[in-house]
Image (cartoon, rainbow, N blue to C red):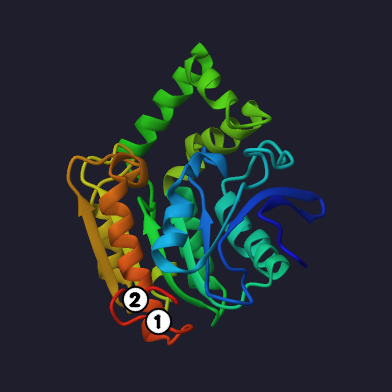
Amino acid sequence: MTIADEGFLDLPPLRLEYRMIGPRPGAAPTIVMLHEGLGCVGLWGAFPAELAAATGAGVFVYSRAGYGKSSPGPLPRTISFMHEEACEVVPRVLAAIGFQRGILFGHSDGASIATIYAGTVQDHRVRGLVLMAPHFFTEEIGLAEIRRAGEEFRSGTLREKLKRWHADVDCAFLSWNEPWLSPQFKAWDITEALGYIRVPILIVQGADDQYGTLKQVEAAQQECFCPVETAVLPGVRHSPHRDAPEPTLRTVSGFINRLLRDHHEGEWRADSGVAA
């Protein structure tokens, strides 16, 4: 297909909102960005465009079913929703855009989805992972914060904030909040997938992340057989690209530029590491 700058991917029964920045997959590596639990295309802000400019790669972002302007997802969402996204939807998205080689970049739930994909699907096109504020297992600190978000949503405060970003705000919120607070979800753990990943990983974590501790980073360091780089940013909470955009962009683009240069992806300028 010819990928416009923005539009919808029709993957029946799904219709997914997307944005494509920079060169298309046939011309350069592609960074596919997977959003957080309450995220969407719009909530990435300027970061995708800045990442495209800093790396010379194409950047593709999309809203999962139920988020942004995408078609609604089924409710109630199962506690396996991240595995379902990684193993059923992500492969269809990559096929639809003609993905040839590049990086999976996930934030929060999106980082967990990227982890599951890379640890489950044998895909030589994926050269590396950027995992920002990832969840590999549940922690009480995160569950407590999710419960507080539920109270704020029911009071109307959070609901009003999210209405700006999501066509079906109730679907978006419940798709995230309900599975995480299911009693069965306390046993959710994807650390096994880490041992099957065979590409380099960068983990970016805020030192003050309200949804997870540095135990998440330590789990990757302990379980992975692949190279794992970490960047723990002081004074940063769950969204490094919003709380500390400049150091986050510098760290992420540096990792991606080195990784793609090592794979000889395109023509690279030695002085900057950016595709010419």
Check disc 2: other Cα within 10 Å, few if <14, some if 14-19, many if 20+.
many
Measuring 70% from the left and 70% from the top, which residue is drawn there? 95
Check disc 1: other Cα within 10 Å, few if <14, some if 14-19, many if 20+.
some
Residue 35 % position (x, y): 51, 48
In what element is the residue under mark 2? Answer: loop
Residue 8 % position (x, y): 74, 50
Measuring 42% from the left and 54% from the top, which residue is drawn there? 50
Q: Quadrant of the N terminus?
A: bottom right
Mark 2 and 1 residues: CB-CB less than 8 Å, in contact? yes
In what element is the residue under mark 1? Answer: loop
Amino acid at pointer 1: Trp
Q: Which mark is residue 158?
A: none
Measuring 32% from the left and 79% from the top, which residue is drawn there? 225
Q: Disc 2 or 1, which lies upstream in sequence?
A: 1
- Which quadrant holds residue 83? bottom right
Q: From where the camera sits, is residue 190 visible? A: no
Residue 90 position (above or below residue 180)? below
Q: Residue furthest left?
A: 234
The residue wearing badge 2 is: 273
Q: Residue furthest right?
A: 12
Measuring 57% from the left and 46% from the top, which residue is drawn there? 79
Residue 164 position (above or below residue 83)? above
Residue 142 % position (x, y): 35, 38
Q: Nearer the viewer, residue 150 or 269?
A: 269
Please indicate whether residue 245 sits to the left or right of residue 93 in the image.
Answer: left
Q: Which mark is residue 268?
A: 1
Amino acid at pointer 2: Gly
Q: Nearer the viewer, residue 217 or 64?
A: 64
Residue 244 % position (x, y): 28, 44
